[in-house]
Image (cartoon, helix red, strand yellow):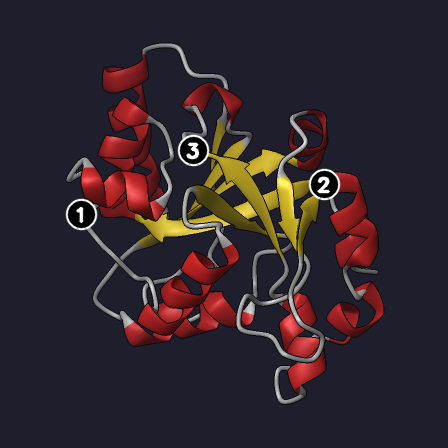
Amino acid sequence: MPIRIQDGKLLYHVTAVENLENIFKHGLLSRTDAISKKLLKVNIADHEIIEKRKELGILQYVPFHFYEKTPFTWTIFNNNPEKSFCCITILRDFAKQQNFKICTAHPLSQNPIAEVLDYEDGFRKINWENAEKRDYDDSVSKNACMAECLAVSPVKPEDFFTIYIADNNTKDYVEFLATNILGNYKFYIDVNPSISKARI
């Protein structure tokens, strides 16, 4: 039986494999930081969401989702079939210890309106029952699925738990990159076929 979203141990951030070199060198940065430092090779952000993040005052954070196969992942994979993606995870316990912020629903959500709260308050406020439905045709369920944990930029590679990639060839490349840039790294690099070029 699948683990409920609420009970998971990890947080998930999807990015293009092309961004990993700079992530290993400089940490996982907020989009704002990465652009200002000219370190973002592949930008998959949605302009409307960026504007809402600006209104909410969360542009300076790195967003993570509470499970991997969110509506966001579907969208970016299918809109960028020529790109290879990976998924960087961190432990929820680490996020809780660091008191990362939580955006309680999709930033554009109006039902309910998304709130930005400290970790424990935000975690309690997420509508987990509707998130668990994973009904992307229902706006309330979809918005709950898109709740975010917001990490202070940068998230250092030493705090990564796993990097999931699509295939063994990409795994070899990422391992080579990590070894050459970081030396001895502690995170896992694992193949997950659902991290694909075109769909999840």
Tell me the number on the disc at residue 11.
none
- Residue 111 placement (x, y as % from top left): 69, 80
Badge 3 or badge 2: first in the primary sequence? 2
Q: Going by the image, does 110 lie left or right of 87?
A: right
Q: Amino acid at mark 1?
A: Lys
* Pointer 1 residue: 41
Q: Is residue 97 above or below residue 79?
A: above
- Residue 11 placement (x, y as % from top left): 61, 44
Nearest to the observer: residue 109 or residue 147: 109
Tell me the number on the disc at residue 153.
3
Element on which disc 1 rests: loop
- Residue 97 placement (x, y as % from top left): 71, 25
Nearest to the observer: residue 93 or residue 89: 93
Q: Residue visible at 24% across and 61% down?
A: 83
Q: How many marks?
A: 3
The reply to whether residue 169 is in sight is no
Q: Residue visible at 52% across and 58% down?
A: 56
Q: Are marks 3 and 2 in contact (CB under 8 Å)?
A: no
Badge 3 or badge 1: first in the primary sequence? 1
Q: Is residue 18 above or below residue 155?
A: below
| Label 1, label 2: how far apart the Cα atoms are | 30 Å
* Pointer 2 residue: 119
